[in-house]
Image (cartoon, rainbow, N blue to C red):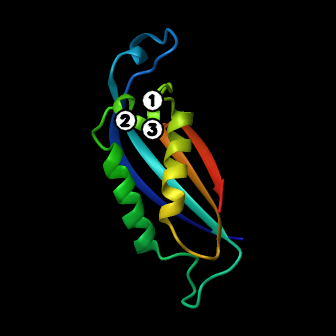
Amino acid sequence: MYQLTVIRDFIAQHYLIGGDWGAENQPHSHHYRAEVQLEGESLDQHGYLVDIVAVEAALERLIARYRDHLLNDLPEFAGLNPSLEHFARIFAQALAPEIAAPNLTRLTVRLWEHETAWAAYTVDL
């Protein structure tokens, strides 16, 4: 199985709802790191699993949606606690259709909230 990972950093804001989490219930920023891991059994005619430039472009477009925004205000988080787990799923499901390569079988987004905590979500392609 071939694997390729592209990493990008961005800052976004959120506040947690539905419980008493102290300061986390107030709007605050996180320096997120998105690791996008792509997997597949074969390479294309150029010896690529996927064109990294195309992955980077799709990733940049998606990050632009979240960069410097309050996640709670975005429609995809309506009615949800904008937890790291929900964010990883939303991010992965939004990115998957934007990365087109016939030999890809899986996409995993590992979203870091800080250097000691991450959540991941995997989409089978």
Q: Which residue is mark 1?
A: 78
User: Which numbered circle lies on residue 88?
Assistant: none
x, y (%) of residue 2? 66, 72
Q: Which residue is mark 2?
A: 74
The Cα atoms of the two marked residues, 3 and 1, are separated by 6 Å
Which element type, helix, strand or loop, lies under badge 3?
A: helix
Asked if residue 34 can be seen in this view, the reply is: yes
x, y (%) of residue 78? 45, 29
In the visual, does 17 lie left or right of 42?
left
Nearer to me, 115 or 45: 45
Q: Is residue 14 above or below residue 26?
A: below
CB atoms of marks 3 and 1 within 8 Å:
yes
Number of callouts = 3
Name the amino acid type tagged 3: Glu
Name the residue: 43% across, 46% down: 33
CB atoms of marks 3 and 2 within 8 Å:
yes
Q: Within 10 angstroms of label 2, few (less than 14), some, or many (20 or more) residues? A: few
x, y (%) of residue 57? 37, 66
x, y (%) of residue 48? 55, 81
Q: Which residue is mark 3?
A: 76
Residue 75: quadrant of the picture: top left
Name the amino acid type tagged 2: Leu
Name the amino acid type tagged 1: Ala
Residue reaching furthest bottom? Answer: 45
Q: Is residue 64 above or below residue 2?
A: above
Name the residue: 52% across, 71% down: 100
